[in-house]
Every structure is written in structure tokens, then in C-alpha cells.
């Protein structure tokens, strides 16, 4: 700047634009309506890991999505690996409750096996709709090779199978399930209830009579139940 030249004052418009571009994370106490730092990081990490996988996720993006300073990741979790394992633990707690409900349905022998199978399939579909990020996290990491895939399979998938296996085996013995092995039936059932992204949009092109994306999951559940349960009243 030349000696004696006047510095142009910063206008409000300039300040607003600069702030919008940098979008700094606000430091200090978080507003009451926002979750505290550890919870916010877990929620954000779950979504990022589900969308990008372990290798594609980075701590800065997770912290930015959580609206916290990136240093809090180290404070609360120490490392990316520990943050991922904390996400698994959070999902395991949620799925433990779901597995208990499935076990209760399976063990309710006052109901016919066909009705219990339908109820179990419906409960699984309902959980999928209510927790899409859980579904995507499991699909993303179960498809990987190595330790993380084994952790997801053992801690998140196997407990659900264990809760349904007696009911599936009973259905096979009763002839209402046309399968030879409960594990293979379970694998096919889970994949049928977890279609790839975009299937709802695809159905609006292939079968517009279904009625749009919001009606896709109910229609899918009806067809899955018809295919996977050989009851006379399907």
C-alpha cells in the first residue's frame, strides 16, 4: 500500500461473504439444542463411515459434520480406529435390543410359526427403515476384507442371526420355509430387505403403479414375505 493511502474499510457485506466461505467452527459452549461433543462426533462418524467406508473417511470431515473442533476426536477417542470401534459399540447396543425383540417374537409359541416369521421379517424391515445409517454402515464394512469385516459380522450381524435361527429352523421343519440351511436363508432374507440405493427410484420407472418411493418399502416387505414364507394365507 502506498504511504498515505487510505485503507478501504471492511464492509458488512464483505465480512459476511468471508465468513460464509470459511465457515469456522464456533468454539466454546455448545448451544443446549445441540448434542455434546462426543455424541455429535459418534453420530457424524457413523454417517461418514457408512457413506465412504473406513479408508475414505477422514477426521476433519467428521469433526466438521459434527460441528466441533477436530482436536476433540483425539480427546474423546484418540484415533480414527478407536472412533470406528466406538461406532461399532454404539450399533451393537442398538442391535442388542433389536435382537432381544426378535427372540421374544420367535419364542412366542402361542402364535403359529407362519405368523411369527412374518412378525420377525416385519420387525427387521422396520428397523432398516428407522435406521438407514446402521444398514449402510454394516453393508459398507461387511463387504471389506480383513479384521473390520470380521468385527462387523461377529458383533453386529451374528447376534441377529442367533435370535432368528431357532425360528427359521422351526419354519424349515414345518415346511413353511423352502430352504435347507438357516444361515443361507438368513443371508438371502437380509439382502432382500436391504436393496441397493436407488431401487425405489428404479421402481418408479419400471412399475409406476407401485406409487412412488414412499410406497416402495411396504410393497417390498409384502413381496419378501410372500417369497420367504410359504404360508397358505400369504
Image: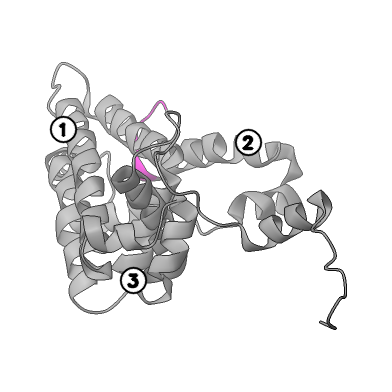
| Separation of residues labelled 3 and 2 (CA atoms) | 28 Å
The relative height of residue 34 versus residue 66 in the rendered view (above or below) is: above
Q: Residue at x 38, y 29 (%)?
A: 232
The tag on residue 143 is 3
Label disc, if present, on residue 214 of the rendered structure: 2
- Can the viewer see residue 205 in this picture? yes
Task: Measure how far apart labels 1 and 2 are at the Cα level.
Answer: 28 Å
Neighbour tally class for label 1: few under 14, some 14-19, many 20 plus, Cα within 10 Å = some
Q: Position of residue 90 (x, y in %)?
A: 23, 46
The residue to which callout 1 is attached is: 100
Q: Tell me the element at label 1.
A: helix
The rendered magenta stretch, by its main secondary structure, is classed as: loop
| Residue 211 is a magenta residue | no
User: Does residue 199 appear left or right of residue 122 in this picture?
Assistant: right
Closer to the camera, 210 or 92? 92
**Label 3 environment density (alpha carbons within 10 Å; few <14, some 14–19, many ≥20):** some
**87 displayed left or right of 137:** left
Q: Write down the region rendered in magenta.
A: 228-233
Amino acid at each position: 500500500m502506498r504511504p498515505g493511502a487510505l485503507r478501504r474499510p471492511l464492509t458488512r457485506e464483505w465480512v459476511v461473504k468471508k465468513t460464509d466461505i470459511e465457515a469456522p467452527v464456533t468454539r466454546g459452549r455448545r448451544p443446549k439444542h445441540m448434542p455434546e461433543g462426543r455424541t455429535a462426533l459418534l453420530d457424524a462418524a457413523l454417517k461418514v463411515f457408512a457413506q465412504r467406508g473406513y479408508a475414505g473417511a477422514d477426521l476433519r470431515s467428521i469433526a466438521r459434520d459434527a460441528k466441533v473442533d477436530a482436536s476433540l476426536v483425539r480427546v474423546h477417542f484418540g484415533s480414527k480406529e478407536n472412533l470406528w470401534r466406538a461406532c461399532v459399540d454404539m450399533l451393537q447396543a442398538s442391535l442388542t435390543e433389536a435382537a432381544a425383540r426378535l427372540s421374544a417374537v420367535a419364542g412366542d409359541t402361542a402364535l403359529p410359526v407362519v405368523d411369527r416369521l412374518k412378525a420377525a421379517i416385519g420387525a427387521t424391515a422396520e428397523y432398516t427403515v428407522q435406521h438407514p445409517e446402521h444398514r449402510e454402515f454394516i453393508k459398507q464394512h461387511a463387504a471389506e476384507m480383513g479384521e473390520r469385516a470380521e468385527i462387523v459380522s461377529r458383533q453386529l450381524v451374528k447376534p441377529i442371526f442367533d435370535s432368528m435361527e431357532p425360528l427359521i429352523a422351526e419354519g424349515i421343519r414345518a415346511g413353511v420355509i423352502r430352504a435347507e440351511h438357516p444361515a443361507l436363508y438368513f443371508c438371502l432374507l437380509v439382502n432382500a430387505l436391504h436393496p441397493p440405493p436407488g431401487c425405489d427410484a428404479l421402481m418408479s420407472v419400471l412399475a409406476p403403479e407401485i406409487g412412488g418411493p414412499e410406497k416402495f418399502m411396504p410393497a417390498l416387505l409384502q413381496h419378501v414375505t410372500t417369497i420367504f414364507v410359504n404360508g397358505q394365507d400369504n
